[in-house]
Image (cartoon, rainbow, N blue to C red):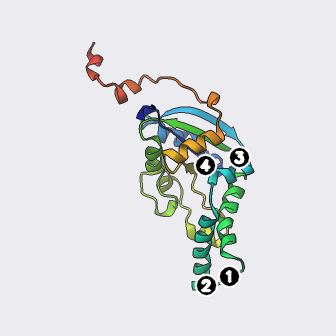
């Protein structure tokens, strides 16, 4: 059985994070919590893999697309396609954005890694994300301007939704042989059961 401190999660620094020179700052934000970096790869994301990565069903596309169509009607705008196509446009825009330049894939390990990363990263919409989070502090995009410009929200980071999603996403982007199993000295203070050893 896997120990809770061995939970892993995926972070992708998106093209806007790379282009704005924020890689070091973003890694620092995660690293200083005590999470351990066990995998890293820099490159252009594969389009086919991105569709697998986002892993959405027709039900999801229909639900999101119906909401977009309703919003268009409410604002006096024409509905020009089936709701499911509006839903698929969300992922099309994301894939277009994620393949527009290099990205940095990171795998972090530690207790509740997925939840900790999500807390540090902040809500999906930067404009409403809390101060102190990556998205709240380092960018200002919003759903509104992204919708007006017909593009994906530029929010610097992708992070796994939860531990189950993380397992699937890490396996999609990394081979097990590319993930390093090692120990940090700082793990003693984070996880050691008997801290009295410090005095010996």
Mark 1 surroundings: few (<14), some (14-19) or many (≥20) residues within 10 A:
some
Could you tell me how far apart the alpha carbons at marks 1 and 2 are, in whole angstroms? 7 Å
Between 185 and 4, the residue placed more toward the observer is 4
Percent of width and height locating residue 48: 74, 50
Residue farthest to the bottom, as pictured: 76
Task: Answer left or right for 196 relative to 87.
Answer: left
For label 4, the residue is 17
Q: CA distance from mark 4 to mark 3?
A: 14 Å
- Mark 3 to mark 1 CA distance (whole Å): 32 Å
Q: Residue at x 62, y 59 (%)?
A: 56
Residue at numbered disc 2: 73
Closer to us: 17 or 192: 192
Residue that carries the numbered disc 3 in the rendered image: 45
Quarter assignment of residue 142: bottom right
Of discs 4 and 2, which sits in the foreground? 2
The image position of residue 130, as x and y in percent, is: 42, 57
**In which quarter of the view is residue 110 placed?**
top left
Q: Is residue 22 visible?
A: no
| Image depth: mark 4 or mark 3 in front | 3
Element type where label 4 sits in the image:
helix
Binning the other alpha carbons within 10 Å of mark 3 as few (below 14), some (14 to 19) or many (20 upward) gives many
Q: Earlier in the sequence, mark 1 or mark 2?
A: 2
Which disc number belongs to residue 79? 1
For marks 4 and 3 on the same chain, the one whose residue lies earlier in the sequence: 4
Whole-percent x and y of residue 24? 56, 39
Residue 123 in sight: yes
Q: Residues within 10 Å of mark 4 (few under 14, many from 20)?
A: many
Query: What residue is at 59 percent from the left and 30 percent from the top?
Result: 179
Ranked by sequence position, the earlier of labels 3 and 1 is 3
Image x and y of residue 113, in percent = 46, 40
CA gap, disc 3 and disc 2: 35 Å
Mark nearer the viewer, 1 or 4: 1
């Amino acid at each position: 059985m896997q120990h809770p401190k061995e939970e892993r999660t995926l972070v992708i620094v998106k093209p806007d994070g790379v282009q704005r020179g924020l890689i070091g700052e973003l890694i620092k934000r995660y690293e200083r919590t005590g999470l351990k970096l066990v995998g890293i790869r820099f490159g252009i994301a594969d389009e086919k893999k991105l569709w697998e990565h986002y892993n959405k069903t027709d039900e999801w596309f229909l639900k999101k697309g119906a909401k977009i169509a309703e919003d268009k009607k409410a604002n006096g705008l024409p509905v020009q396609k089936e709701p499911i196509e509006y839903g698929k446009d969300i992922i099309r825009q994301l894939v277009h954005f994620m393949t527009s330049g290099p990205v940095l894939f990171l795998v972090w390990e530690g207790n509740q890694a997925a939840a900790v990363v999500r807390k540090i990263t902040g809500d999906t919409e930067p404009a409403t994300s809390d101060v102190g989070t990556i998205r709240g502090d380092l960018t200002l995009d919003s759903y509104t301007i992204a919708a007006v410009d017909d593009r994906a929200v530029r929010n610097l980071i992708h992070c796994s939704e939860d531990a189950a999603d993380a397992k699937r996403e890490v396996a999609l982007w990394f081979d097990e042989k590319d993930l390093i199993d090692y120990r940090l000295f700082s793990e003693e203070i984070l996880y050691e059961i008997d801290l009295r050893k410090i005095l010996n």
